[in-house]
Amino acid sequence: GGFHPVHLGDLFDEGRYRVLHKLGAGGHATIWLARDLLELSWVALKIVLAEESQAIEFSVTLAHSIVSKSFHDHRFVTYERYFYIDGPNGIHLCLVLPVLGPSAYRVSHYLESRMQPRLARSVALQVAQALAELHSQGLCHGGEQYAISFF
């Protein structure tokens, strides 16, 4: 199966989440801004490709378990909860995540300039410290890139 078809206004998880805007897409998932109608809060829904859902569920639940027990730090973002969507392209894992700011790449692109050296050093230091903490717990991340460091 491919991506789950999503339309603005769609409701997920028994009507709890209403989709309002597409935030992005990658090779394995689409990400949507949604309103949690139960908690009255904003969330990001990451809807994973059906064929990737089982493998991704295993890795994210393992990482979530370690991160939520070991780190009480805003630098580590993990899902709040997850559920499944049964759609025309298969069964899709949907992670409910906090809404983050733009990536470092998008900020730089929006400003039409490079980051100021002081800010770039601060971002790089925070990313390096976060990765060191993950590694100390036996976790690794394969996508350390400028584009995925969020504000």
Image (tube, rainbow, N blue to C red):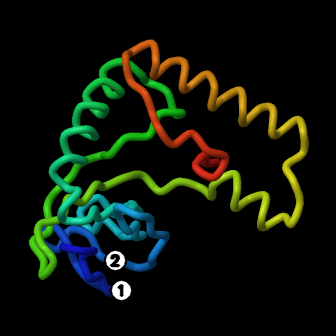
Mark 2 closeness class: few <14, some 14–19, many ≥20 residues within 10 Å: many
Question: In this rendering, is residue 77 above or below 139?
Answer: below
- The image position of residue 19, as x and y in percent, is 34, 77
State the image quarter where residue 79 is shown: top left
Amino acid identity at mark 1: Leu
- The image position of residue 8, as x and y in percent, is 36, 86
Q: Is residue 46 left or right of residue 82?
A: right
Give the alpha-carbon distance from disc 1 to disc 2, as whole Å.
5 Å
Tag 1–tag 2 contact (CB < 8 Å): yes
SS at circle 2:
strand
Residue situated in front as seen by the camera: 109 or 71: 109
Residue occupying the point 70% across, 56% down: 105
Residue occupying the point 15% across, 51% down: 54
Residue occupying the point 27% across, 74% down: 3
- The image position of residue 112, as x and y in percent, is 86, 66
Q: Which residue is mark 1?
A: 8
Q: Which residue is mark 2?
A: 19
Q: Is residue 91 left or right of residue 107?
A: left
In the current view of this chain or complex, which residue is farthest to the top?
136
Q: Is residue 4 left or right of residue 88?
A: right
SS at circle 1:
loop
Residue situated in front as seen by the camera: 14 or 27: 27
State the image quarter where residue 84 is shown: bottom left
Question: In this rendering, is residue 88 above or below 122?
Answer: below
Residue situated in front as seen by the camera: 86 or 10: 86
